[in-house]
Image: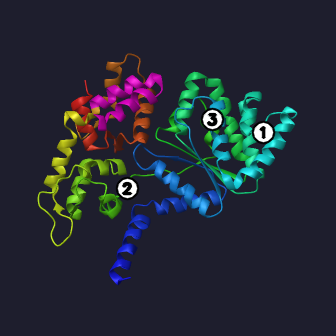
Amino acid sequence: MPTYSILNIFLTEYMEIGMHGRTAQRQQLKRKLEAGISIHMPAPRRIGKTWTLNRLASDLAADGWCAIEVDVEGIRTPEAFARELCKRIEAQSTLKAKFEAHFSQRIANLLGGGFGDRPLDALGKVDPLEFLETLIASLDEAGTRSAILIDEIAYFFLHCAEDDPKGANSFAYRLRALEQRYKNVRWVLTGSIGLDTIAKQYGIEGAFVDFETFVLEPFTTEEARSFIRDPEIQQQFNHMFDASDADFDSMFTQLGWLAPFYLKLVANEVRPAEPGADGKPPIVSTAEFEAAFERLLQPNRQSEFAVWREHVSKNLPTALRQIAMHLLHRLSETPDGEILDTLLARAEQAQKGATKRQVRDVLAILINDGLITKCGDRYAFRSGLVRRYWHEYEAE
């Protein structure tokens, strides 16, 4: 193989592993799990949280772990939670025989036998929390280091608590007991809304004190440039291109939110003014990036951003949704944002009885979601692009 080809392969792998592949974060997470630490990994929407969780599961599996991934968005009851976890455990072919042997013995002792030939056959015959503990205990006894990686855990507790506050409380503290009792099983909890705020809202904060917080941050400017320049990522764009570091950084400043989804969104709208030379991709400037922003803000592109409105209206606690909308309308008016006292006055004007604590809780959720940020004493939209969209199409 020619030397230049080997070098190109090395550089491509380095960009994936060393720059924007979240390798350092994955290694840190794996080291913590190996040390017996269970983790809460809050991460805003569109940041690559699920991608990172998938890669972490692969990293663990490659080192002999049993990594079980469960997405619980849309699940509202402990029974449905236990059912989904059981399905995911059964799907682990290397673990299935050992797990089912331990599970069969435990559930037979619980029921006195006769539950059928599949673990899920027993779910309707026992309390779902007892079934869940039987699952985790059987996994622990199987003798393989296991990690349960649960995506969108805060959504589950939000909807569960709205339907059944006592049931959500019982489930949360049972989950803590399982995490403490069965040491061969580690947990990674993640989600795109703030678990801390939801737990505070429904009085279950103590259930998560043993989970170490590991915040997954957006890309740095170096990682963002590496991401866009990655040959595999470039293949996904309408037009392949490159730019100077300075022009990339200018675009990043306007975008403000260096998450893979929005980097791709902007890059896909870049239309180079001139063709490339000598087989290289064309070089674009700030003007082409600004034109991409303008295309994204046309009326026919609103669906690209509507997920934020849906997120606020559907996934915040009921008492806080209207407050959140009023605060976002105010914040969209200026890129510089507002101080807390101004936002509190706006909330009280828009919704009689709104309290300072409620406003603080809403702001905490919106920061965790990545929709806004706090710099000094001012709150502002994190993304200039999303702020411009909100001001034009959502604000009242």
* Magenta part of the chain: 303-330
Q: Quadrant of residue 228?
A: bottom left
Q: Where residue 166 appears, x then y in whole percent?
A: 65, 24
The first of marks 1 and 3 along the sequence is 3
Q: Is residue 306 magenta?
A: yes
Q: Earlier in the sequence, mark 2 or mark 1?
A: 1
In the image: residue 349, left or right of residue 61: left
> Residue at coordinates 71% horizontally, 53% vertically from top-left?
95
Identify which amino acid the numbered label 1 is placed on: Asp
For residue 84, what is the image quadrant? Answer: top right
**Predominant secondary structure, magenta span:** helix
Check the picture and name the quadrant holding the C terminus: top left
The residue where tag 1 is placed is 117
Q: Identify residue type, mark 3.
A: Phe
| Residue that badge 2 annotates | 219
**Residue at position x 38%, y 42% in the image:** 370
In front: label 1 or label 3: 1
Amino acid, disc 2:
Phe
Residue ID for mark 3:
81
Q: Is residue 343 above or below residue 252?
A: above
Quadrant that contains the N terminus: bottom left
Residue 153 seen anywhere in this rendered image of the structure: yes
Q: Is residue 22 above or below residue 318?
A: below
